[in-house]
Every structure is written in structure tokens, then in C-alpha cells.
Amino acid sequence: MTTPPNSAQLDAFRGIWPALLTPLNADLGIDHARFAAHCKSLIARGCPGVTAFGTTGEGPSFSVAERKEAIEQLIANGIPAAHIMVSTSCAALPETLELTRHAVNAGVHGCLMLPPFFLKGVSDQGVIDSYRYVIDGMGQDLPKLKLYLYHIPQVTGVSLSHHVIAALKQQYPDTILGIKDSACTTAHSIGLAEAFMKDMTVYVGFEPDLPEMGRRGSTGAISGLANFMPRVVDRLVTQPDEPTTPAERQRVVQLIGLLDGYSLMPALKGIMAMLSGEPAWLRVRAPLVALTADEFKALEKSIRAFGIDPESD
């Protein structure tokens, strides 16, 4: 049973905003033309918007200047700013603030923000103070900020506890619109929904959990698989009780299983390279390592047998 949305939930994003893979040139700089073309393709396939520089997009591997330029280039190349979400997370809080201010003043929909992710074992108060540094630092730009808290402790080593989320929502009720939970634990996502869905939207990054969260009021997702299966991902969360949903969910589970044994981001880029016929998609920034020729050949064989249909997926 879902509760009626409040004003903050109505302002939150809806639908699938793919967690964009970041295409690279031969010098490992960002390929702005391919980046924009990928965004346009996803929007043409029904995505309301796109999400740049999250975990899937190798965000922390790029400099502040590179990330600013990329957003400016997306807008210049025809992606409406209001259809862009930006992960502004950096290890240094002044850089997070700089990127957040830049994104807000560019007119993007909102910002996705990790907790501090270099030092480990930090207290809840330390996490709260980190978010406060950025939010309070926005000054006169604060009313324009729509912020989504990003929980992915297996990557950051830092969790967002219920206490942290509740404290931040209480202090900034009009700024914090949602939580992206990528812990990939069904019970944790359900716990967040039960605790916070009445006040803000809870999204999950683990696609097999989308039907369960859709039944509990979740209205969309920031998804890595949506780089090439946006319609399937959308149906999982927006049509959780359709007769075809269990089969589509099982298909997603099967695909995730095929990716076991590979480093995830290089494998996702491998699928993009296969589907697009553009080997340039294989490039990654260190410390990630691109698929070898043999790995790509094996992945291509399994994905072609699995089958991804650009017209329906």
C-alpha cells in the first residue's frame, strides 16, 4: 500500500534516468560527441533524463574541470539541462561544493551525492557535517538545489544510517528529495521505504529489487543496465504487477549472472561496444582495466546468446 506523494516527492524525478557510462577518446579524455549521442538515444527511447558521473560513470576518476566541461558540452550538444542529473561527489568537500554549484547554475534537475568516501569509520555526525558543508555552502543558490542522497557502502565504505537520513531531511526538508539505495540488499531497501517513503522517494540501483520497490511507491531508478535496456528497467518499477514482470525480472537476474566474473563497469562498456559496433566504448580510466580481447569475445558470445533487443528492451 502506498501513501499519497507530498510536495517534495512530486518534485523528485520519475522514470528511468540511466546511470550513464562515460565514453572516452584514445587519450582517455571524455568523448563529448559520443556522450551526447548516447544521451539522445536514451531520451528517444523514453528516458525522462540521464545521470552523469555516478559509480557506473566512473565519476571520481575525472577531475572537477573535466566534469564541468562534460555537463556544459552535453547542454551545448542539445541535452536539456533539466533532463540531466549530476553526481557531484568528490573526496574533497570544497570540490563537491564547486561541482554542485556549477550543476545547479547550469540548470540541471538535481544532484546525486555520496557521503564522504575517503576516510573510513567516520561517525554519523561526521557524515551529517559533510552534507551540511555542501548544502550550507550553496548560499543564495540553495533554493535551486534538489539533492538525492546516495547509499552504496560496498563502494564507499561509509553507510548512510537512518539517523543520518532523518537528521538531514529534518534540517533540509525542501532540499533533499530522495535516496538512491545501491547497497543491493532487498531488506535494507524495504527498510528505507518503510522509514522514509512518506517524506521522500526511495530509489534502488539493483534492478531485481525494482518491482518490490515499485509496489512500495518508488517511481523510478538510476540504473546501469538502463544504458542498453531502459524500457525493461522502466517496466520493472512502473508496472510491478503486470503478468510479464516476473519473466522480465528473471531476465535481468540472468543478465547480471552473465556479468559475474567480470569487473562490472568494463563489462557494461563491453556490452555497449557490442551493441553499438563501436570498440571505443571499451575504454576505461585507471584504476579500472578494460576487457582483454579474449574477455570481450567471451562476453560478446554470452550476450548475443542472451539477446538484447533495442526496439523492446
Image (cartoon, rainbow, N blue to C red):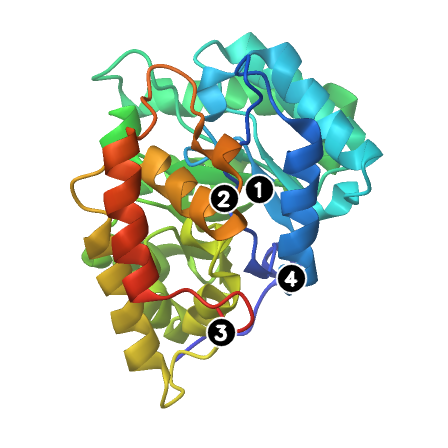
Residue type for callout 1: Thr
Q: Quadrant of residue 144?
A: top right
Residue 18: image x %, image y %?
A: 53, 50
The label shown at residue 238 is 3
Q: Is residue 86 above or below residue 309?
A: above
Residue type for callout 2: Ala
Residue 250: image x %, image y %?
A: 25, 72
> In the rendered structure, which disc, 4 or 2, sits on the residue that comes first in sequence?
4
Closer to viewer: mark 4 or mark 2: 2
CB of mark 4 within 8 Å of CB of mark 1? no
Q: Is residue 302 above or below residue 210?
A: above
Q: Quadrant of residue 161?
A: top left
Residue 161 seen anywhere in this rendered image of the structure: no
How busy is the neighbourhood of tag 4: few (under 14 within 10 Å), some, or many (20 plus)? few
Q: What residue sits right under mark 2 in the picture?
A: 19
The label shown at residue 51 is 1
Q: What residue sits right under mark 4 in the picture?
A: 10
Q: Which element carries disc 4, helix, strand or loop?
A: helix
